[in-house]
Amino acid sequence: EIIKFEPVIVYDIKEFEQFYIEQKETVLGEVDLSKEKIKSWIQDPESLELSENFNRLLNVSRNLKETYEGERPDLTDQSRSGYSMVLASILTSYNFFTDEDIIKIMIAQPRGKLRENTPEYLIYTLKKAKGGHTPVEAEELPEEIELPKEVKLEEVSQEKLNALLEEAIPDRGFLRDYIDIFSEITDTPKSFLFWGAMTTLSTILGKNCFVDWDIRKLYPNIWSVFLAPSGFRKGT
């Protein structure tokens, strides 16, 4: 901040070197939409049909819903353009939205620029959002792939597995209570009940301790995948 100015005062640019900020080049992605088409959408936003995938995600992703509705106090930029940028970035992180889908959603966004949108602004914002995501290059697979040795069911000792699981059951606490209660009303082996108890406990704690809440709601069977073999039907 320059707090004093007089004709005799001369500032050398080198005096400000400690305040230099490196400017990174903005990387822009490709957007293939005509400005005339976007302009017609802006003029008649009520007639826009939004993607079914978007409506589905809006019901399960708290982050997406709060961004769309403008309820993100954690964002530094609370302007309408700031919310548009964040929304575009979230949508481009998914691989099932077209450019047309995203532009329409940005136009309909209650916290976006609404009728103040212009085709130029929307295209630039989307290009900037797409440029911010580095595409993942596909790995080249070898011509000959060696498949792993197939494990036959009879090679797995169920007795040893049951013994290991029963040893893992704690002496007290939620897991112990869960198993004891269900042992009284079902003949399901304790090893199966152990998987069920672990799955239930993980579901209870998952919001804060495991997988992100929004992701967990998208994949309701995620705990079964992590905690139990698929054959353990009763436990999972």
Image (spheres, rainbow, N blue to C red):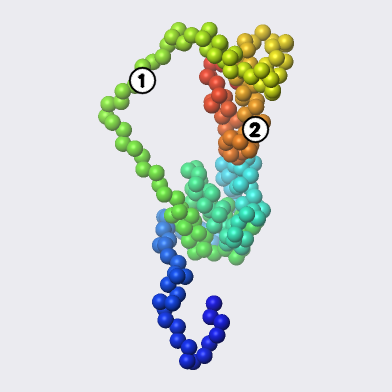
Disc ID at residue 148 = 1
Mark whose residue sits in front, 2 or 1: 2
Q: Are marks 2 and 1 in contact (CB under 8 Å)?
A: no
User: Residue visible at 65% across and 32% down?
Assistant: 205
Alpha carbon separation for disc pair 2 and 1? 35 Å
Tell me the element at label 2.
helix
Tell me the element at label 1.
loop
Looking at the image, is 210 positioned above or below residue 180? below
User: Which of the two discs, 2 and 1, labels the residue nearer the N terminus?
Assistant: 1
Query: Residue 71 location in percent, x, y?
Result: 66, 53
The answer, for residue 114, to whether it is visible in the render is: no
Classify mark 2: residues with Cα within 10 Å, few (<14), some (14-19) or many (20+): few
Query: Residue 100 location in percent, x, y?
Result: 51, 51
Classify mark 1: residues with Cα within 10 Å, few (<14), some (14-19) or many (20+): few
Q: Quadrant of the N terminus?
A: bottom right
Q: Tell me the amino acid under the disc marked 1.
A: Pro
Residue assigned mark 2: 205
The answer, for residue 152, to whether it is visible in the render is: yes
Looking at the image, is 77 positioned above or below residue 55? below
Front one among 120 and 155: 155
Front one among 145 and 112: 145
Looking at the image, is 191 positioned above or below residue 207? above
Front one among 31 and 81: 81
Name the image quarter holding residue 185: top right
Of all residues, the one furthest to the left in this rendering is: 143
Looking at the image, is 21 positioned above or below residue 111? below
